[in-house]
Amino acid sequence: MKTQRHEPLLTEEEILNLLTPQAATSSTQEPQSPFITRPLTIIGGALMAAAGIATVYYLASDTPVVETDSTQPVASTQHVIEQTQQQQEQKMEPRRQILTEREQPLVMTMDASRTELASLGVNADDQKIWFIEDGQRVTISHRGISLKPSTEADLNRTPVAVTLYDTDGAYASWYDHQQGAPEMNDLVPVKITLQSDESDLHQNVVAYLWFAPELAMSVEREITDFQEIRDDSRDVSIEKVYPNPVSGNEATLILTTQRSTNARICIVDVSGRQLAVVFENVRLDNGSNSFVLPDLQSMPSGMVLVTIDLPEHGTRLVQRLLIQR
């Protein structure tokens, strides 16, 4: 701001005469700032591209001055994009892990109504299941499986095998030896939940009834939805497992491959509970590969599943094995 220089030794009257009306009026106003020569404009906000907080002051100069918070990082647009991608990947990582750890249902079971069960030769209520087999009344409840002589007519429509599970795993099983040795992967499983009292030894009891495919056709379902596929359609297939059913301590699994790959072979029950890791990371050579499944006597009787995980293929093959003593 400019001011007039006063000469010394002037009288008060001379000083007043020197003042113009405009000067006299301006002397009553507040002095202007020595820095701002036009109205002040302030813009406050977050500059997303710079990932920092800035305020822009327009001063007398035509060039804006940006004051940036020194505590905030200043990044390029490319860096911000990379950070956003990293954050998205970090958010997706738990989901990827869940998808990796999550296993698909190992056994697709048929939920049959009582009418459909009757067409399979089976009667059921909330607490028990029963059917007639070769002059025996087979009764299945949370207490176990019992057989009693019966004079009722045998309908020749019975499951091949039955396994009872509670919260601790399989605890009872039954197998119809007269039906021979069917292909276990072709059997159709029917799952039935049985009620039990809080004081009962076995809780959350589930019965798995395994029916031959020709009998399961009496239920209007696509039975192939409940059977196991023997190959992954990409070079690896299950040739067979024998003996099946098995009553001894060992069984033999034979796999056929069109090219070499790695596999993880385990034995689990129908709920996915791991019973044994047979091979953690075994090499499958091109052609036929034979593996011994040991220590089967340490496992409960009933249907178990031999799982063959193929990491290079991203698939799993499942072979059913009936342990019966």
Image (cartoon, rainbow, N blue to C red):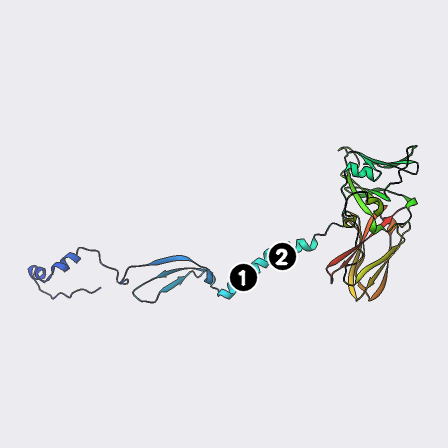
Estimate the x, y position of residue 55 in percent, counting from the top left. 38, 59
- Check disc 2 and give the amino acid type: Glu
- Check disc 1 and give the amino acid type: Gln
Quick one: label 2, few (<14), some, or many (20+) residues within 10 Å? few
Q: Which of 132 and 116 is in front in this view?
A: 116
Mark 1 — residue? 83
**Does residue 143 sit above or below 215 in this rendering?**
above
Q: Nearer the viewer, residue 145 or 115?
A: 115
**Does residue 229 sit above or below 1 in this rendering?**
above
**Does residue 302 sit above or below 18 in this rendering?**
above
**Does residue 220 sit above or below 252 in this rendering?**
above
Q: Which label is found at residue 93?
A: 2
Which residue is depicted at the point 74% across and 58% down? 315
Which residue is depicted at the point 46% across and 62% down? 49
Estimate the x, y position of residue 200 in percent, counting from the top left. 79, 34
| SS for callout 2 | helix
